[in-house]
Structure formats: C-alpha cells, structure tokens
Amino acid sequence: MIKRKIESSSAREAQWLKSYYSVRAAFSAVWVALAFLIGKHATAGVAVLLVIYPAWDAFANFIDMSRSGGTGKNRTQAINIAVSAVTTLAVLQTLSVGTPPVLEIFGVWAILSGLLQLATAVRRWKDLGAQLAMILSGAQSALAGAFFISQSGGTMPPAIFRIAGYAAVGAVYFLISAVWLHVKHARRNSI
C-alpha cells in the first residue's frame, strides 16, 4: 500500500515536471526569439526582456516549488526564488547605468541559480530519475555566469544577445528533460 502511494506520488510529480519543463522551454524559446527580433532596435523592449527573464525564473520556481511539496521539501528552489527576485530588482535599477553592470548581474545570477538548479535536480534524481539534462543545465549555467562576468567589459555583441544564447541553451535543456520524462513514463506504462 505504501509503495503504491509512493509510486503514485512520483508519477504525479513526473507528470507535473513534464508539463513544467515544456512550459519553461516554450517561454525561453519565445524570449530568445523576441531578444533577437528587437535586440538591436528597441531599447525599451530590451530593458523589458532583461527584467522579465529573472522575474519569470522566480515565478516559475515558485509554482514548481508549490506543486512539488512546498518550501520544506524544496529549500534550493526557495533560495532560487529569492535570488531571481533580487536579480530582477537589481537589473531594473541598473539598466540606466549601462550594459556591463547588467551583464555582471546576470553572471552572478546565472552562477547562483545554476548551482541551485543543479542541487534541485540531484535531489529529484533520487525519486524521479531523468534529471541528467537539468544537472548539466545547472552546471552550464554556472559556467556561463562566469563567462558573462569575464566578458562584461566587452562591446560586442550586445548583452541581450549573449543572454539570449544562454536562454536558448536553457530552452534546449528544458525540452530534453520534458522529452526524457515522457519517454521514461511511456516505457514504464508499456511494461
């Protein structure tokens, strides 16, 4: 009886994560498309995109944490929400200063949120498996953050394009994770 409840709970969480990862992939793909569409021409549009990206991450992590057992079970996500919210405010306040500090803020955020995502994926691996792409994504995010910081003084390409490349890779990782969970679920049901 207890084993069946645990399997049912894991199946529900896996179903939720498939949907969650798919939405994250779709959002990032649209964000990247908009960044490349308006990146060179619309300063106000770029500013909005730069604020929306970490704000969306905070919101998405909040929804996932709420659906996956709350703060007690998901401390790394709770911290990630705070980090993304502070990043959103920092980007908003720094936009008028210029691109280098915004890229530095994104760099610090990518490092912290990447490490927190990696920790969340490692924890989920025990119950759900199919988290390798999220582990790789978290590690890649931390490396990209260090790259952002080291490149923040450069002039080309504009920061929005650097961040869009980062977001595009993240979208691929989320899509791979969604597909991986779908295949794993389909295999389990066919047995």
Image (spheres, rainbow, N blue to C red):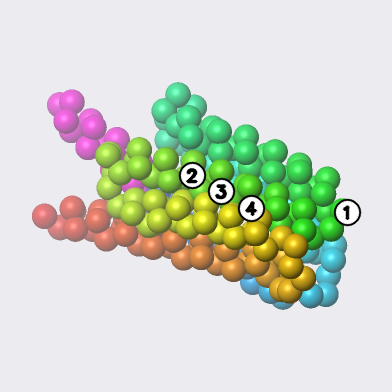
**Residue at 51% across, 60% down:** 170
| Residue with the mark numbered 2 | 115
- Mark 3, Cα crowd under 10 Å, few <14 / some 14-19 / many 20+, is many
- First in sequence, mark 1 or 4: give its number: 1
**Residue at 52% across, 52% down:** 142
How far apart are the two marked residues, 3 and 1, measured between alpha carbons?
23 Å
How far apart are the two marked residues, 1 and 4, measured between alpha carbons?
18 Å
Name the quadrant containing residue 84.
Answer: top right
Whole-percent x and y of residue 147?
60, 60
Q: Are the residues at dot 3 and dot 2 in contact (C-beta closer than 8 Å)? A: yes
- What is the magenta range? 1-16
| Residue with the mark numbered 4 | 107
Residue 14 lies in the magenta-colored region: yes
**Residue at 32% across, 59% down:** 180
Q: Are the residues at dot 4 and dot 3 in contact (C-beta closer than 8 Å)? A: yes
Q: Amino acid at mark 1?
A: Ser
How far apart are the two marked residues, 4 and 3, measured between alpha carbons?
6 Å
- Image quadrant where one finds the N terminus: top left
How far apart are the two marked residues, 4 and 2, measured between alpha carbons?
12 Å
